[in-house]
Amino acid sequence: MPRTPATLVLDHRQTGKVALNVLVGALESFPDTAAVPVDFVPRERDLADAVARALEASERVLVLWSFYSPDAAEQARRLAQVRAAVPDPRAVHVAGGVHASAEPLATLREGWDLVALGEGERTVVDLARAALAGTDLRAVRGLAHLDPGGALVSRGRGEAVTLDDWPPFAPAHGRLGPIELTRGCIYACAFCQTPFHHRARFRHRSLPEVLRWVRVQKAAGFRDYRFISPTSLSYGAPGPDPDLAAVEALLAGVREVIGPSPGARLFFGTFPSEVRPEHVTPAAMALLRRYVDNTSVIIGGQSGSDRVLERIRRGHDAATVERAVGVALEAGLEPHVDFIFGLPGETDHDVEATLRLAEALAARGARVHGHTFMPLPGTPLKDAPPGRLAPAVRARIDRLAASGGLYGQWARQAEVADALAGRRAPG
C-alpha cells in the first residue's frame, strides 16, 4: 500500500483540544489540506502508539501540541516519553499556544522541533502544505526552530486572522465546540496572556458568520451552545462601552436558529467566558435573563484593593465589583466572582481588603472563584514573584470554601506558580 505524504497526530487532551479543533478547521478550508489524515488522541498513554502507527503509513508525521503555561512542565515530560518511545526523526513535534509563543526558546530547548508563534490558522495550512510537498518545514512563516548552535531562528509571527475567514471548529471531522466570538482584548490586564498573544484590540466574528456556525452545530445535534470571548458583553463593540444592541441581536439570532429544540440551551456570560463588572448593568442583566439558560454569570473581580486593581490595569475599582454583584443578584443571576490571591506588591492591607470583599460577597449570595497569582510568560508580570498564601490567609480561604462560598484551584495554582518561577531562564 502506498504511503501518504503526511499525517497529523494531535495531542487532543482537554486543555488544548479547542485550539487544535480550530486548526483542523483551518485545514478543512482548502481542498489540498482537507485530505490530510488527522488522528485525534485524547489519552496520554495512546499518543506514542498513534505516532508509531502514523509513521507506518506516512512519509512524515506532524505531532501538534497546544498548551497553556501552567501545563508546560507536564507537557515537556510527556514529550520526552513519546520521543523515547518513538525516536524516529520523521515525527516532527510542533508546539503552539500562548506559552510556546511567549517562551519559544525555552520550549524548543525542552524538545519540540518547531514552535508556532502567534495565531495558527494560516501557519498550520502552510505547514501542512510544506509537509505534503516534502519541503523544509522550518521555512514556514509563523514558526521558530533552533539552529545547530542552539540559537533561536524565527520566521516571524503567524498571520493575525479575520475570524470571519476561518471556521471556529472542524465540522468535517465532527469536532465541534464553543464558537469564538471575539479575539484579542483592549483591557490588557497585567496578569493575562490573552491581549499579549492576540493583541490588545477586539476582533469580532460577524453575526451572520456566528449564526452560520450555530446552524452547523444544530444540524449536528448540538444541545449546549457556548461562546468564547475575553469579555462577553463587549461583543460587537470597538471599545470599552458595551453595544447591547449588538449583544441582543446575537442572542436573539441564536435563539431563533436553535428554536424549540428539546434540551437545547444557550449559555452566555459564563464558562468559557466572563463579563467585566462595569458591564453588569440592569439593562445588560435583563437582556441575559430574556435569552439565556444559564442562571449564573461570571464576573471578573480579581482584587478588593483599589491600589492593586490600578497596578494590574483592571480599569475598575472594588466598589464596581460590589455594585455588579448587587445588580446580578437583583436580576436573579447568581454571581461567580473571580479573585486572584497573592498578587504581586500586595500589602497586608490589600490582602485584608480582598478577603473582606470576598467574604462579604459570599455572604450576599455570590460565589467566589479563587485563584492564586501565577507569573505567566508573555505578560507584564512574568518576572513577578509567584503568589504566596500565608497560613492565616489560606485558613480564611479554606473556611470560605467549606461554607460553599468559594471554589477553585487556588491551592494547585500556588504550586504551579512556584514551578513557573523556577523555570525562568537565568537573567
Image: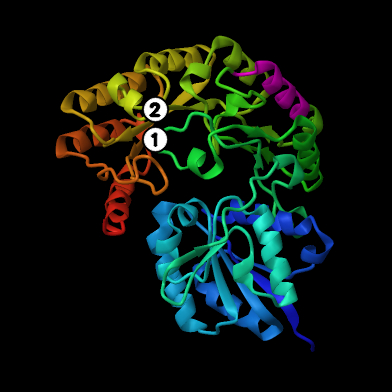
- Name the disc covering residue 313, or none: 2
Span of residues in magenta: 242-255
**149 sits left or right of 246 in the view:** left
Question: Mark 2–mark 1 contact, CB under 8 Å?
Answer: yes
Tell me the kind of residue under disc 2.
Answer: Arg
Q: Give above or below for 328 relative to 86.
A: above
Mark 2: few/some/many CA within 10 Å (<14, 14-19, 20+): few
Q: Is residue 31 above or below residue 343?
A: below
Check the image and report above or below for 171 versus 362: below
Residue 201, quarter of the rendered image? top right
Q: Amino acid at mark 1?
A: Ala
> Percent from the top left, x then y, of residue 354?
28, 25
Residue wearing tag 1: 190
Mark 2 or mark 1: which comes first in sequence?
A: 1
Q: What residue is drawn where x is 32% and y is 27%?
A: 311
Quadrant of res 361: top left
Name the residue rendered at 36%, 44% in the picture: 409
In the picture, measured across the screen, residue 109 lies left or right of residue 95, that is: left
